[in-house]
Amino acid sequence: MCGVTAPYRIAKYKVDKVYEGKYEKDEIIVHHLFCRSDVLEELKKGDKVLVMIDLRSPPAQISPDGEILRSEDKLDKYYAARRVAKVTTCCDF
C-alpha cells in the first residue's frame, strides 16, 4: 500500500493485439499505480510491450497531465495496469 492517496503515471499505448477480453480502439490510456518513481523508466517511446490491465471504477479524482489526458477529456472506462513487460525478440507474441 502506498498510503492514503493513489499516485499513478499515465501512459498511452498503441494496441496491436488483445489476448483476452475485448477492446476495439487503436490506442488505450492506462494508469500505472506506483510506489516508486521508476515504474516505467525502462521503457521508451516505440518499445513493444505486453500490458496486463484491470478494468476498474474511476477514482474520485484523476489528475490530467495535459498531453495524454487533458482536463476536458472524459474517461468512459478506467484501465489500471497490473503488469507491463517489454517484449523482446526471443518471446515476441
Image: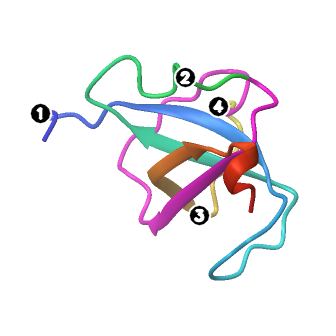
The crowd level at tag 1 (other Cα within 10 Å; few <14, some 14-19, many 20+) is few
Between the C-alphas of marks 2 and 4, the distance is 28 Å
Pick out the residue farthest to the front: 90
The crowd level at tag 2 (other Cα within 10 Å; few <14, some 14-19, many 20+) is few
Looking at the rendered image, the disc whose residue lies closer to the viewer, 2 or 4, is 2
Is residue 91 found inside the magenta-colored segment of the image?
Answer: no
Give the numbered dot on residue 3.
1
Q: How is the image coloured?
A: rainbow
Q: Which residue is mark 3?
A: 77
Q: Which residue is mark 4?
A: 71
Q: Which residue is mark 2?
A: 42
Between the C-alphas of marks 1 and 2, the distance is 25 Å
Q: Residue at x 36, y 17 (%)?
A: 37
In the foreground, 65 or 89: 89
Q: Position of residue 25 (x, y in %)?
A: 84, 64
Q: Which residues are magenta?
A: 45-69
Looking at the rendered image, the disc whose residue lies closer to the viewer, 3 or 1, is 1
**Callout 4, which amino acid?**
Ser
Q: Position of residue 10 (x, y in %)?
A: 56, 34
